[in-house]
């Protein structure tokens, strides 16, 4: 399918089994979009060249120059992290020099990762350490978007609900989720705070009523009959909110539920769960419940006159999966399972229990349009949020329109697919670049990835060189990585 046809089709959240819908995480930024409508550009064919190259392309007549004399002020970059900037504990050679170089040119970029379960600042600190950067360099700060970062912008009424949260370290996830109040100053404008227009990354998550699986097994010793690991993995727990009970329900089929029965409104899988058995059991129990009350069983389950045979049709909690990555690249020479593998296990159990019903869930992270929308708006408001609103010419501007964004990633199923399918309303073109340092490897059986990028390059440095040459910039690896990198010019 052509890019024009794809953008016309306006794909929604294709990775889930639910109909596309606007989630509570999607920031409403219609004002931003309207402000940049005058800058809508035509789509270019460069995003589907599928240029296969082990090196950056040579400058010749085949490479189009950027408009307006080759300016790069209206392009930006989105970097995946694992497998692109580092593998395991080791940075990709040249990555930190490259970042310093594009930062020195005041170019826009964000780090768009499907990683999660930690605070954005913690991920930034980890990235700084692995790349050998110093803490006082403004290269990484406030540019990290984790798989669950868009939840910062969820409506306050949603954040007031009771949520079940799990992940690699559920208690750590909860502590982050509990944060409340702004992370930084919010400037009022026309009586409204500017987070209405997106500075949601300045907001804390603010989920005050977060419950973990550990809370449940400590509150009801019969909920999970196997080794509960209460003294190790699940040793940290809290009392249930507002004196609610995990043991109040004794008749699962009764619709007369005690007032102190625990009800869960949302299920948030933030990143790779460790105790799949416990998490699948608890999530299953909530998805078969009556209106999210723990310990109940909905009378609609299995009703063939209802959609999905009645499963998840009785006010059960929404299930949110923070990312769909089946595998990811660590230091081990073979790919490791990610959150997507947990989801597949959950789907398998669900099919067996429900006699083949589809598991209905929502996904954040790449390749979902919601996450790319969030990243795109961050880039549009980059100068107003990262530079205090100050432009290179000394003026102030909330929105800096984009013409093209280059997504550099290692996973065709998330990075490349997401960029290829994303069609922002302002007409910006997202171009995908695949690196060979991560998840995807060319094999005899798979000569090219399922989702085809604009270019396949050796590493992230070659990816930047490819992109800049595509914009008419006369540059090579040596120039890009040179100390100071002040010698490369825009426009060729």
Image (cartoon, rainbow, N blue to C red):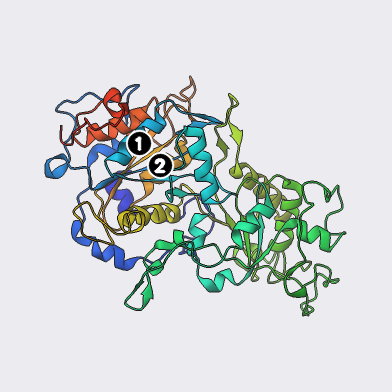
Q: Earlier in the sequence, mark 1 or mark 2?
A: 1
Question: Does residue 358 appear in the picture of this structure?
Answer: no
Label 2: which residue? 137
Q: Residue furthest front?
A: 136
Of residue 122 and residue 422, the one placed in the foreground of this image is 122
- Residues at badges 1 and 2 in contact (C-beta under 8 Å)? yes
Report whether 300 appears left or right of 14. right
Q: Which element is circle 1 on?
A: helix
The quadrant of the rendering that contains the C terminus is top left
Could you say which disc has been placed on residue 220 in the image? none
Tell me: 268 left or right of 457: right
**Which residue is labeled 1 in the image?**
100
1 or 2: mark nearer the eye: 2
Residue 158: x %, y % from top left: 56, 70
Q: State which quarter of the image contains the N terminus.
A: top left
From this view, report whether residue 60 is shown above or below residue 390: above
> Which residue is farthest top?
444
* Depth check, front residue: 478 or 45: 478
């Amino acid at each position: 399918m052509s890019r024009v046809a794809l953008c016309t089709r306006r794909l929604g959240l294709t990775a889930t089994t639910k109909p596309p819908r606007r989630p509570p995480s999607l920031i409403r930024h219609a004002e931003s979009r309207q402000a940049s409508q005058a800058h809508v550009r035509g789509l270019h064919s460069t995003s589907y060249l599928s240029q296969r190259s082990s090196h950056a392309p040579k400058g010749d007549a085949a490479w189009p120059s950027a408009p307006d004399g080759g300016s790069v002020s209206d392009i930006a970059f989105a970097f995946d992290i694992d497998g692109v900037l580092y593998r395991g504990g080791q940075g990709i050679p040249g990555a930190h020099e490259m970042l310093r170089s594009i930062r020195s040119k005041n170019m826009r970029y964000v780090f768009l990762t499907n990683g999660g379960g930690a605070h954005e600042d913690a991920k930034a600190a980890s990235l700084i350490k692995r790349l050998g950067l110093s803490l006082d360099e403004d290269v990484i700060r406030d540019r990290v978007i984790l798989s669950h970062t868009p939840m910062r912008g969820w409506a306050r009424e949603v954040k007031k609900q009771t949520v079940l949260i799990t992940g690699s370290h559920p208690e750590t996830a909860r502590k982050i989720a509990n944060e409340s109040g702004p992370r930084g100053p919010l400037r009022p404008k026309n009586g409204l705070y500017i987070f209405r227009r997106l500075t949601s990354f300045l907001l804390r998550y603010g989920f005050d009523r977060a419950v973990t699986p550990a809370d449940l097994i400590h509150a009801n010793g019969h909920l999970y009959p196997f080794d509960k690991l209460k003294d190790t993995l699940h040793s940290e727990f809290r009392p249930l909110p507002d004196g609610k009970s995990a043991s109040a329900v004794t008749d699962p089929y009764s619709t007369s539920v005690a007032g102190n029965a625990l009800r869960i409104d949302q299920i948030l899988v933030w990143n790779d769960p460790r105790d799949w058995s416990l998490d699948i059991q608890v999530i299953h129990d909530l998805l078969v419940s009556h209106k999210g009350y723990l310990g109940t069983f909905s009378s609609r389950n299995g009703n063939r006159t209802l959609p999905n045979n009645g499963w998840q049709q009785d006010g059960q909690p929404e299930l949110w999966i923070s990312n769909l990555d089946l595998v990811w690249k660590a230091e081990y020479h073979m790919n490791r399972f990610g959150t997507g593998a947990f989801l597949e296990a959950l789907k398998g159990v669900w099919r067996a229990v429900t006699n083949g019903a589809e598991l209905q869930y929502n996904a954040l992270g790449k390749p979902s349009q919601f996450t790319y929308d969030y990243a795109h708006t961050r880039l549009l408001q980059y100068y107003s949020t990262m530079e205090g609103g100050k432009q290179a010419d000394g003026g102030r501007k909330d929105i800096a329109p984009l013409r093209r964004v280059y997504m550099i990633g290692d996973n065709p199923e998330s990075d490349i697919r997401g960029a290829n399918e994303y069609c922002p309303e302002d007409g910006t073109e997202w171009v995908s670049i695949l690196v060979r340092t991560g998840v995807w490897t060319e094999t005899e059986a798979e000569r090219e990835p399922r989702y085809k990028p604009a270019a396949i390059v050796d590493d992230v440095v070659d990816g930047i060189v490819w992109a800049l040459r595509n914009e008419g910039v006369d540059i090579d690896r040596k120039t890009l990585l040179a100390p100071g990198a002040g010698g490369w010019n825009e426009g060729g």
